[in-house]
Image (tube, helix red, strand yellow):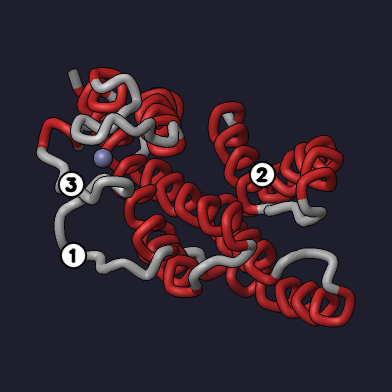
């Protein structure tokens, strides 16, 4: 039963974060009810149930019958699946919270090639509150500034990628090397596909997938 609740929670986060990202990206108000993007009809509760609304309505608007993008549905399904599976592996609600943050940062990086500082800072705050990583902070500071200055001159990676690696280091210590290795490997494999699209490769989604993989294999 608890795992089913996590499934509902994960899919709800998938729905909420995608809608939040969409509204911010399109400079829409964060308040007010959701509506169909085509006919602007206000959506009712039955249209807003994660995963099931998309399936029941065959991916279409109930009012104007235009086909919806499957992007929100995929995100709902993804987090709905990840939440219970990850909890089985980690028994940690903190890991689910970190995953929610990484999910939103990935959305931003994929669509805008930049992320919100406020999201990064609040993730840093959560890591500080829950894991009190003061000894790791002493190790991190000189390494962080070294790579920050190196990257400032040579731009081999996004600033937010370095910030995110630093935050994850505070959380998982030396295991960050494994996350860096896996994410770099995945990005290298995917690079030819992104090169065909626009040449830019968003790195945070790869950090996200690698962190997920690390959580599943760390036992
Ligand atoms: Zn419509």
Tell me if the residue at label 3 has its CB under 8 Å from ligand 1. Answer: yes
Q: Position of residue 219 (x, y in %)?
A: 56, 27
Depth check, front residue: 26 or 14? 26
In front: label 3 or label 1: 3
Q: Which mark is residue 31?
A: 1
Q: State the mark number for residue 206.
A: 2
Q: What is the number of the mark on residue 19?
A: none
Q: Quadrant of residue 57?
A: top left
Q: As drawn, is 160 to the left or to the right of 29?
A: right
Mark 1, secondary structure of its residue = loop
User: Residue at 45% of width from left, 53% of height from top?
Assistant: 104
Residue 95 appears in which quarter of the rendering?
Answer: top left
User: What residue is rendered at 44% in x and 61% in y?
Assistant: 127
Q: Earlier in the sequence, mark 1 or mark 2?
A: 1
For discs 1 and 2, the disc positioned in front in the rendered view = 1
Q: CA distance from mark 1 to mark 2?
A: 32 Å
Q: Nearer the viewer, residue 45 or 9?
A: 45
Q: Which mark is residue 41?
A: 3
Badge 3 crowding class, 10 Å Cα cut-off, few under 14, some 14 to 19, many 20 or more, is: some
């Amino acid at each position: 039963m608890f795992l089913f609740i996590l499934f509902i929670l994960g899919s709800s986060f998938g729905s909420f974060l995608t809608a939040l990202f969409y509204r911010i990206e399109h400079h829409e108000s964060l308040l007010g009810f959701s509506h169909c993007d085509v006919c602007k009809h206000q959506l009712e509760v039955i249209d807003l149930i994660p995963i099931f609304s998309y399936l029941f309505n065959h991916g279409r608007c109930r009012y104007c019958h235009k086909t919806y993008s499957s992007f929100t549905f995929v995100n709902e399904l993804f987090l709905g699946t990840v939440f219970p599976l990850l909890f089985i592996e980690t028994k940690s609600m903190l890991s689910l919270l970190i995953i929610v943050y990484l999910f939103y940062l990935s959305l931003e990086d994929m669509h805008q090639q930049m992320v919100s500082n406020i999201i990064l800072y609040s993730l840093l705050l959560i890591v500080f509150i829950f894991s009190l990583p003061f000894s790791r902070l002493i190790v991190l500071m000189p390494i962080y500034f070294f790579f920050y200055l190196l990257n400032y001159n040579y731009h081999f990676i996004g600033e937010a990628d370095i910030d995110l690696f630093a935050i994850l280091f505070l959380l998982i210590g030396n295991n960050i090397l494994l996350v860096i290795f896996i994410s770099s490997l995945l990005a290298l494999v995917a690079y030819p596909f992104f090169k065909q699209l626009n040449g830019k490769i968003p790195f945070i989604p790869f950090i996200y997938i690698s962190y997920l993989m690390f959580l599943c294999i760390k036992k």
